[in-house]
Amino acid sequence: MRLASLFVLLAFGPLVLVGCASDSHAPSAEEGFEVEGSLAFLTPGGDTLRTIDVDIADTDAERRRGLMRQRSLGYDRGMLFIFDSVDEGGMWMKNTPLPLDIVFVAPDSQVINIARRTTPFSEKSIEPAAPRNFVVEVRAGFADRFDLTDSTRVRWTRSE
């Protein structure tokens, strides 16, 4: 009996381990998020409030998709939207299941305004208070947690 049990364990044990290993590669809630750079939120004096990894949306298709269908987002990640021109175009939450803080940023990297705790799936346009060149989307509550205000600045770099 012991010999038969040992045989079964030796024969099928590796298969069980392979099955467990494949479970560890199950799709994560942040699958599809691509770290393409980093972004720091700075005080007016230049001190860093928080640095995050960013997925960069700098094409029309990427800007349209944004964080749609993203099911989770840590406080260490966000999406940076880079626009081709400075304008007052807004953002929306269509197909976005997470509430977000949306940070509108002027061409000089100064925060214009912050839309806090936006409504998931909403098609209502969320507008900047002045012309923007960049938008940063982060997890809802981020702005309050890290003391972002309209005097905050951003500095970002693209990964090599």
Image (cartoon, rainbow, N blue to C red):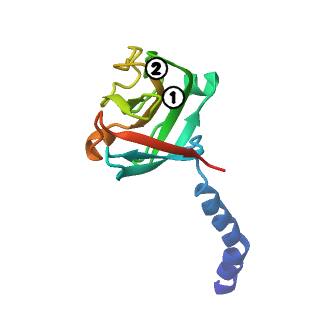
Placement of the N terminus among the 4 image quadrants: bottom right
Q: Helix, strand or loop at disc 2?
A: loop
Instruction: Rate crowding at label 2 as few (under 14), some (14 to 19) or many (20 or more) other CA atoms within 10 Å.
Output: some
- The amino acid type, in three-letter code, at marker 1 is Met
Could you say where residue 149 lies in the image, as x and y percent from the top left?
28, 36
90 w.r.t. 47: above or below: above
Q: Left or right: 56 with respect to 52?
A: right
Residue drawn at 33 percent across, 27 percent down: 118
| Percent coordinates x, y for residue 68 in the rendering | 51, 28
Q: Residue 33 or 50: which is nearer the viewer? A: 50
Identify the mark nearer the N-term, 2 or 1: 1
Mark 1 closeness class: few <14, some 14–19, many ≥20 residues within 10 Å: some
Residue 94 image label? 2
Task: Residue at 60% x, 62% y: name it.
Answer: 20
User: In the rendered image, which quarter is residue 72 located in?
Assistant: top left
Return the residue nearer the eye: 31 or 78: 78
Asked if marks 2 and 1 touch (Cβ < 8 Å), the reply is: yes
Q: Which amino acid lies under the numbered mark 2 shown in the image of this protein?
A: Lys
Q: Position of residue 5 (x, y in %)?
A: 65, 79
What residue lies at 69% left-to-right and 74% top-to-bottom? 8
Q: Is residue 113 above or below residue 90?
A: below
Quick check: can you spot residue 29? no
Label number found at residue 104: none
**What distance separates the C-alpha of mark 2 from that of mark 1?**
7 Å
Q: Residue 33 falls in which quadrant of the image?
A: top right
Which mark identifies residue 68?
A: 1
- Count of numbered circles on the image: 2
Left or right: 92 in relation to 3: left
* Outermost residue toward the bottom in this view: 2
Say what secondary structure mark 1 lies in: loop
- Of residues 54 and 149, the one drawn nearer to the viewer in this rendering: 149
